[in-house]
Amino acid sequence: MNLPSRLLDDAVEAFAGLPGIGRKTALRLVLHLLRRPEEEVSAFGEAIARMRREIRFCRICRNASDQDTCSICSNPARNTGVVCVVENLRDLLAIEHTGQFNGRYHILGGVVSPLDGIGPEQLAVEELEERARSGEIREALMALPPTIEGDTTIHYLAKRLESHRIPVTLLARGVSFGGDLEYVDELTLARSIATRRPYAPEGASEGGSASGEGPR
């Protein structure tokens, strides 16, 4: 695609670097901005730059925030004893959108994946265990991807939390194995939260539901 301006080409390359944006879509966005008033485009660019420059991450759960503590962790109406462990911010937002979870979160920042060179030391595992040591957590709901890497991470975290006597629960398998939470429909995800079950290592008996319709 030969463009008449190097400036246009640079802008298209910038947009095409975003996930899910091809060069045709990038060009359409660039041409749209080219038709907008200069002050509007400047405000658009400044909003992006300011977001990256000023955004903070919650000191408790690592959620995106304008303050040191996010709106979820600072909300006194939330159930502080139930912590939902998620891989990333997208999964937190997906669960929040269901309106079925009223606890707090802990963003790991990934899952254990030896093939990708990601071990527990690259994740926020120590921070989770520190929250466990503080007595804050009464239940750890593992809302990690239903994949081999996700299950490996759950097994590792359950071992780390075992000495703290914290019940570990899982999303019900309404979420299909191998899928990503951000693509699961809201109803399925909501039911998976409400019907979460106790975690049991492979070969052990799971028993009954840890919470069912209990504390959220």
Image (tube, helix red, strand yellow):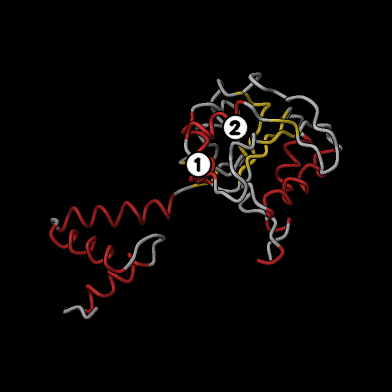
Q: SS at mark 1?
A: loop
Residue 145: where, in percent of width, then height?
61, 47
Q: Are marks 2 and 1 in contact (CB under 8 Å)?
A: yes
Q: Is residue 82 above or below residue 173?
A: above
Label annotation for residue 192: 2
User: Upstream in the sequence, badge 2 or badge 1?
Assistant: 1
Q: Give the SS element for disc 2.
A: helix
Residue located 32% across and 71% down the image: 13
Going 48% across and 41% down the picture, which residue do you hit?
65
**Circle 2: residue type:** Ser
Mark seen at residue 184: 1
Which quadrant: the N terminus?
bottom left
Alpha carbon separation for disc pair 2 and 1:
10 Å
Task: Kindly indicate the quadrant of the structure image that contains residue 191.
Answer: top right
Q: Amino acid at mark 1?
A: Val
- Measured as percent of width and height from the top left, residue 126 is found at 74, 48
Q: Judge by depth and name the residue closer to the eye, 22 or 78.
A: 22
